[in-house]
Image (cartoon, rainbow, N blue to C red):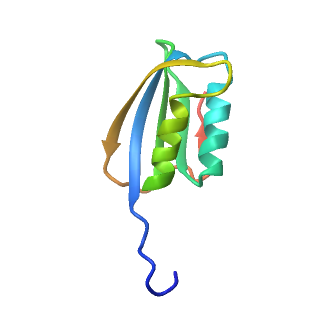
């Protein structure tokens, strides 16, 4: 890092996305967007029809992913994104995993 540059603030969140978010490519599109943003974490379907995800990385990239989650891929119809802030922790998949 060059002199005078601030260290980026790191952020880790867990989110639950509701609406028509299963069967529309939401997990794959979320993983693609998270990888594009350089985030670590995972995304998975929930039994109740929601999609859960955990993401960690620079705060601005995490905020961008949260905003993207509110839209999702073209066939999704997102009705809610509930976000919980988590303490930073090691061990998240740096490739942003799609869990089955």
Residue 58 placed where, x, y %?
Answer: 47, 58
Residue 58 seen in the figure: no
Q: Is residue 5 above or below residue 84?
A: below
Q: Is residue 31 above or below residue 7?
A: above
Q: Is residue 90 above or below residue 54?
A: below
Is 92 displayed left or right of 72 in the figure? Answer: left
Residue 99 seen in the figure: yes
Identify the residue at image location x=40%, y=59%: 10
Residue 74 placed where, x, y %?
Answer: 68, 23
Identify the residue at image location x=39%, y=62%: 9
Is 85 displayed left or right of 61 in the figure? Answer: left
Residue 69 placed where, x, y %?
Answer: 53, 32
Residue 19 placed where, x, y %?
Answer: 50, 14
Identify the residue at image location x=40%, y=37%: 14
Q: Nearer the viewer, residue 17 or 77?
A: 77
| Res. 6 image quadrant | bottom left
Q: Nearer the viewer, residue 50 or 36?
A: 36
Total numbered badges shown on the rendered structure: 0
Is 85 displayed left or right of 72 in the figure? Answer: left
| Res. 42 image quadrant | top right
**What residue occupies the far bottom of the structure in this picture?**
3
Quadrant in which the C terminus is drawn: top right
């Amino acid at each position: 890092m060059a002199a005078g540059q601030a260290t980026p603030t790191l952020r880790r969140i867990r989110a639950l996305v509701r609406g028509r978010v299963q069967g529309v490519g939401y997990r794959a599109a979320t993983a693609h967007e998270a990888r594009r943003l350089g985030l670590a974490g995972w995304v998975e379907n929930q039994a109740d029809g929601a999609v859960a995800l955990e993401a960690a990385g620079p705060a601005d990239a995490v905020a961008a992913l949260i905003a993207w989650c509110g839209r999702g891929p073209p066939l999704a119809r997102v009705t809610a994104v509930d976000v919980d802030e988590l303490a930073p922790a090691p061990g998240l998949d740096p490739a942003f995993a799609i869990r089955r």
